[in-house]
Image (spheres, rainbow, N blue to C red):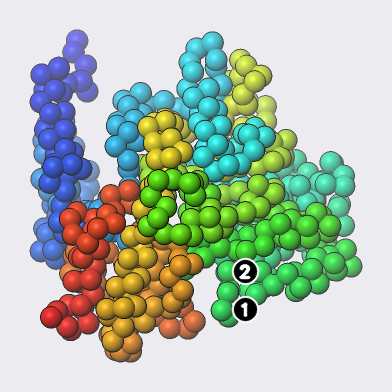
Amino acid sequence: MPNPFAVNEAEFSALLAQIQDVITKYYISNPPKEIRPPEHILQTTIQAEPPEPLRKEPLGTHATIQNLLNDLLPGIFVQSSPHFYGFVTGGALPPALLADFLVTMLDLDVMVHLPRDSIHTTIERHTTYLLCDLFQLPRSFVPGSTITTGATASNIVGLACGREWLLSRDDPSCSVARIGYLEAAIKSGVHNGIRIMVAKPHSSIAKAASILGLGSGNLGHLPASEAEPWNINLVHLEHYLSKQEEDGVRYIVVGQLGEVNTGRFMSDIPRLRELCTKYGAWLHVDAAFGLPSRCVNVYDEDTERLADWDKVHNWCSGVELADSITSDGHKLVNVPYDAGLFFSQHPDILQRVFKNPGAAYLATSGADIVAPCNVNIENSRRFRALPIYAALTALGTSGYSALIRRLILHARMIARIIQDELSQYYELLLPNIDDMFMVVLFRAKDDALNAVLAEKINAMGKIWVSGTMWEGSKAVRIAAANWRVNIEEEGHGGVAIVRDVLKIVAGSDS
């Protein structure tokens, strides 16, 4: 009896050819010019959704694919555009995109290390070695590393490890993983719990604290100054750390490399490490999009375009001193969503927290690589390592150095347009362009325009930006994160379109 869910080879090949044609045009030959679909398209595609309740009779594979391509796809905005400047959204490099197609075909669950049966976990381990090489981290981080769904998950993993280490550091029986947070805190004498000390963290730190029972309201904010809120006030931090025993608390300290609104970097991680070591605190560094700055090679051929690549290279100085590090693959590493990165110097703590206890069916057949499900939140995991491996292998360190420089130069070109050509209408909120990473923060000088600036820019459909708040006022953030950006004026990914949009929005298109 034929399988009712199967399609024959001819039908499958025809549908695949149709999708291939759509992908090739979308990705290579004729990428969409408009990022946001027009309003009438949005309304039409929303109305084209399948009716509720779910139909009884099957629509079939062919009709369903036509529904996706013709009715739904036109209503989805083009996040892969080089001019999608919101959310620090990277793009999928060609080798990573093609590898991701293979991942879907393989449909692997990368959960258990079974070296006699498959090499997929070995590929993931090799990928973490290559990531350490790219970011110039010691390879000793590899046993405590894992690939997650994103920086939020990596921050959860990092704070969970910090929670475990802090309460069991003096007495292994005070393990949160085994006896729970409340009992472990009481037994270890930490009657007022764990606090998280931050400067200006990403919101996912508070989210992670909420999920882990540490409390999103239990963050201590210690910005160094209004001018540099991404730095922690070290004097105030030491004051709190020195009183932790009498206060009945212990501390996780979170450093930020790549503050979300400005792209700026905490400047003194070595000193943070000294304080954390002195007082027994856990140092977690959130470098979701900042860590790739470390791969910029100051000796590449075109350094004459900008003299300060050594400064960029050193922005992450000392990150290897952290107990745990968060980063992202789907941001500046430019692999497909989703791919988060986590590194730790404490593989024993990582395994203690995330091990599946008493699950005989998850037993590994090799001791050299820990089962991924025992160092990660998820048991069931997509083969996220393969696109990362493909991108790293295809580009190498010099390719990634060139990519990060391209993103920085693109952002700085936009900043100079705002500062030099459009200063009548806009204010660059961090005017020292030579210290700029790949984020441009600005506002409109006219308050009425500034209140709706992001909406007006996005409504044109040519570029897409994020609205934010800075120093109590609305602002707009442009984040150059896609490999397609150009460091020329014209052409696909060039900065001329940004100039044109900003001039029109300001009411001056001359």
Name the quadrant of the N terminus. top left
Q: Is residue 144 visible?
A: no
Kindly identify the residue that appears in the image at 67 percent across and 34 percent down. 140
Q: Are marks 1 and 2 in contact (CB under 8 Å)?
A: yes
Marks 1/2: CA distance? Answer: 8 Å
- Determine whether, in the image, residue 184 is placed left or right of residue 317: right
Q: Earlier in the sequence, mark 1 or mark 2?
A: 1
Pick the residue in front: 496 or 380.
496
Which numbered disc covers residue 225? 1
**Amino acid type of the residue that numbered disc 2 sits on in the rendered structure:** Asn
Establish if 81 lies above or below 464. above
Snapshot quadrant of residue 418: bottom left
Kindly identify the residue that appears in the image at 32 percent across and 33 percent down. 95
**SS of the residue under disc 2:** loop
Q: Which residue is mark 2?
A: 231
Q: Position of residue 332 (x, y in %)?
A: 42, 49
Outermost residue, bottom side: 447
Q: Position of residue 165 (x, y in %)?
A: 76, 47
